Image (spheres, grey):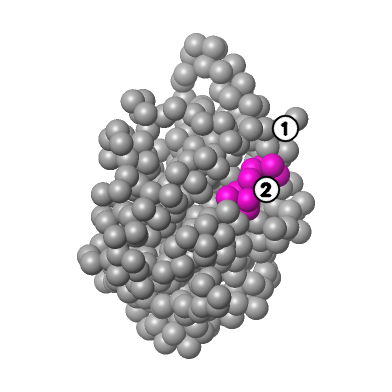
Amino acid sequence: MRYDFDAVVDRRGGDSIKWNLYGDGILPMWVADGDVLSPPAVIDALVKRAQHGVYGYAGAPAVLADLLVKRMQDLYNWTITTDDLVYVPGVVTGFNIAARAVATPGGGVLVQTPNYPPILNAAANHDMVTQTAELKLVEKNGVIDYALDMDAFTGAITDDTKIFILCHPHNPTGRLMNREELTAMAHACIERGVVICSDEIHCDIILDGRQHIPTAALSPEIAQHTITLMAPSKTFNIPGLGFSFAIIQNPELRAKYKKVMGGMVPHAGIFGYVGALAAYEHGQEWLDQSLVHYAGNRDFAIDFVKKHMPQLHITNPESTYLSWVDCSRAGIEGNPKEYFQKFGVALGDGRNFGSQVGDFVRITMACPRSLLADGLEMMRKALEPLS
C-alpha cells in the first residue's frame, strides 16, 4: 500500500498545542509533532477499542512485551527479556525518573549541548546540578554537523556526576553517534561510576539506510550501567497516546527506577498500549515510506537553503525529521526565532537548546512537502530586507 505523506491535514481549531499556540496566520514548525496521518492500522485499532465502550484500568498485553523483545533482537541483535521492560507514559518522564533513581539533590547530571530542552532542564527539576559537555561544531560547503569532543566530555565529569543523559539519535542536530563514540562515552562513564540514561526516542527514524546502535547493546557490561528509553511516539506520529518504555537489564538499577515511580508515575493508558501494539505489529511498511519522505524533505530543505538563503547554514541530519539552522551570519538583530515569526513561520528557538546556540532555529520537517516549502519561503522573504 502507498501512503500519502503529502496530504494536508487541517489541525487548526482542534486540540493541537502545535497549531494553537501561535494562532491563525502562523505556520507552526517549532515542535517535534508531525503533520502526517498515523498508520491506518493504528487508527483502526484505536477506533475498535474505543467502540468497546468500557475504559477501565488496563495492563500491558503480554504480546506487546514479547514483540518488543523480538524487535530488539531483530533490529539490533540485542537480547533482552520481558522482565527488563518498564512502561512509562513518556520519555521525558522516563529520564526524569532515571535522574531521581540514581542521584540526589546537589548531584551532577551530565548533558551535551546543544540538546533537547527537557534534557537540559532535568537536573533543575530535582535540585540537581547541570553539567555540560559541548559538542564540536564543524562546517563544510554551507552544511553544518557536530562531532563528539571527547576531551570536553571527560572533562565535564566530576566526582559529583551521577548520571549522563544521552540524546541518541541526537536532537536537534540529527547526528547519529557511531559505535566508537558511544563506546568511548560509555567507558568514561563506567570508570567514574556514572549511570547512562540513553534517550533513543528517535531510534526508528534513521535515514538513508543507516543503522541505529542502542547504547546498551554495545556490550553486557555497558548494559548493566544503562537505562534505555524508546517509544513509538515519534516513529509513528502518536505522541499524544502517552506510551514509552524503558529497558533496564540491571535488576538493582531497575528496582531503583521502579521505586521512584511508585505512587508518582501513572501507568500508560489503554490507548497507549493499543496504539503501540498496532504500530509495532503492522506499521513497518508505513515507517519505511515515511523515512523516504523525511529524507526527501531534508534534501529539499538543504537545496532550498543553499540556493535561496546562503547566509544560513543547515545540518544534513542522519536521523530524526529535524533540521538545525545557524542564523548567525544572516544579519538578524535579536532572536532569530522571533524575527522569522513576524513573517509568518514559528520555528524552534535555539536559545532553548543551550546558551551557546542562541542564533539557531530548529525546523520540524515531518509534514507535507508543500508546508515545508511554505515555511522555507517565509524564511526567505524574511531575509530579503537584510540582504
Q: Residue at x 67, y 32 (%)?
A: 3
Report the magenta residues as a range. 287-298
Residue 295 shown in magenta: yes
Q: Residues within 10 Å of mark 1 (few under 14, many from 20)?
A: few
Residue 357 shown in magenta: no
Res. 133 visible in picture: yes
Instruction: Tell me the CA gap for discs 2 and 1.
Output: 12 Å
Q: Residues within 10 Å of mark 2 (few under 14, many from 20)?
A: some
> In the picture shown, does residue 328 fall above or below 171?
below
Q: Could you tell me which secondary element the residue under label 2 belongs to?
A: helix
For label 1, the residue is 2
Tell me where residue 16 sits by quadrant: top left
x, y percent for residue 103: 36, 67
x, y percent for residue 253: 51, 61
For label 2, the residue is 292
Res. 124 visible in picture: no
x, y percent for residue 197: 49, 63
Q: Is residue 353 left or right of residue 179?
A: left
